[in-house]
């Protein structure tokens, strides 16, 4: 079956359609959960931070914007390869030990007590757990990880912006509950929560599928929006790496994941999405920046979301 998007949709308040050019002839099929007007109420449903880059997320009810524009606690720590002996004059660190490069990161299960600044870690399905204070026990934690991975690593910290995947758009990433449900439905054995763990968003909005695609425009422009009075700026649809194609518990590749994703993403791309970004369709979720005027502010689950009607030049003349 060949599916393509029908661009002759009269308005954003109308259903989004696709064209099925299968063996039974051409017909227009309505896409599920894509009816939405810009002014319908949308609110923040989940806040998810990843205290250690590439490891599990933890959900919080309220979160501050850190200096640099990221979420407080999000990717504050990272695991990196150690390339020299600790304490040596040439002490240095190497590349990230993350899901892109090290599949065994998927086999680690972590929970956090952010108030006490601790992480509890174990190999998935193992009974033995270990708890470390992220500052006081950081060297011990690094030793445990080094033993697990089989090579020396270090745990590093950055309070000013953390270790984001996209340093040019280092604000929280945004997706909707409807999008997670819709994308999970493209696969027979993937539930919505697993899809969320594969895609690793920070902010999950209570909104229909692909609503967040209105939060970016063509390259060179940003879309201002607010969550509970905190200003954010939508930049672009996130280009996905290999991580979403893997089972988040085992790291095993899901056969045909990317091919199915690309086909269905192209077929269901809503009319309000700026196609200028889509040199390929392995893009989902919105990357953002946060102006420094919002650093230190906070938002809370259930806060309303509003979108500014005025676009802003991403590179204003100096």
Image: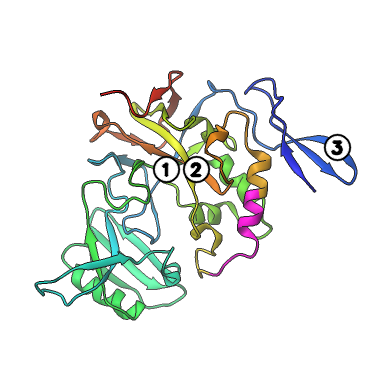
Separation of marks 1 and 3 at Cα, in angstroms: 37 Å
Q: Position of residue 241 (x, y in %)?
A: 48, 56
CB under 8 Å between callouts 3 and 2?
Answer: no
Q: Position of residue 46 (x, y in %)?
A: 44, 43
Local packing at callout 2 (Cα closer than 10 Å; few below 14, some 14-19, many 20+) is many
Residue 113 shows up from this direction: yes
Image point (36%, 54%), residue name: 50
Q: Position of residue 292 (x, y in %)?
A: 24, 32
SS of the residue under disc 1: loop
Q: Circle 1 sits on which residue?
A: 173
Residue 151 position by quadrant: bottom left
Residue 207 shows up from this direction: no
CB under 8 Å between callouts 1 and 3?
Answer: no
Nearest to the eye among marks 1 and 3: give it.
3
Separation of marks 3 and 2 at Cα, in angstroms: 31 Å
Q: Circle 2 sits on which residue?
A: 285
Residue 107 against residue 225 in the figure, above or below? below
Q: Circle 3 sits on which residue?
A: 26
Instruction: Give the quadrant of the C terminus.
Output: top left
Which callout, 1 or 2, points at the residue further toward the start of the chain? Answer: 1
Image point (42%, 30%), residue name: 220
- Please provide the residue range marked out in magenta: 252-262
Q: Position of residue 265 (x, y in %)?
A: 63, 44
């Amino acid at each position: 079956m060949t599916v393509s998007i029908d661009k002759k949709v009269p308005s954003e308040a109308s259903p989004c359609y696709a064209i099925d050019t299968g063996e039974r002839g051409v017909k227009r099929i309505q896409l599920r959960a894509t009816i939405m007007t810009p002014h319908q109420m949308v609110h923040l449903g989940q806040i998810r931070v990843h205290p250690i880059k590439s490891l599990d997320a933890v959900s919080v009810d309220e979160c501050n914007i850190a200096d640099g524009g990221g979420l407080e606690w999000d990717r504050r720590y990272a695991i990196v390869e150690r390339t020299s002996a600790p304490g040596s004059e040439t002490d240095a660190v190497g590349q990230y030990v993350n899901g892109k490069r090290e599949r065994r990161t998927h086999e680690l299960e972590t929970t956090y007590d952010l108030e006490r600044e601790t992480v509890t870690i174990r190999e998935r399905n193992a009974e033995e757990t270990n708890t470390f204070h992220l500052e006081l026990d950081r060297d011990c934690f690094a030793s445990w990880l080094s033993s697990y991975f089989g090579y020396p690593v270090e745990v590093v910290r950055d309070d000013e912006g953390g270790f984001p995947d996209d340093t040019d758009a280092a604000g929280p990433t945004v997706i909707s509950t409807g999008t997670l449900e819709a994308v999970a439905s493209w696969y027979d054995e993937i539930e919505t929560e697993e899809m969320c763990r594969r895609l690793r968003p920070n902010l999950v909005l209570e909104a229909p599928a692909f609503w967040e695609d209105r939060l970016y425009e063509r390259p060179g422009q940003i879309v201002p929006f607010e969550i509970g009075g905190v200003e954010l700026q939508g930049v672009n649809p996130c280009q996905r790496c290999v991580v979403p194609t893997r089972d988040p518990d085992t790291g095993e590749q899901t056969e045909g994941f990317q091919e199915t994703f690309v086909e269905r993403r192209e077929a269901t791309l809503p009319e309000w999405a700026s196609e200028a970004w889509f040199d390929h369709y392995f893009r989902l979720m919105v990357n953002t920046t946060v102006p420094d005027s919002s650093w230190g502010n906070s938002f809370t689950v259930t806060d309303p979301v509003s979108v500014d009607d005025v676009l802003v030049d991403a590179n204003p003349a100096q």
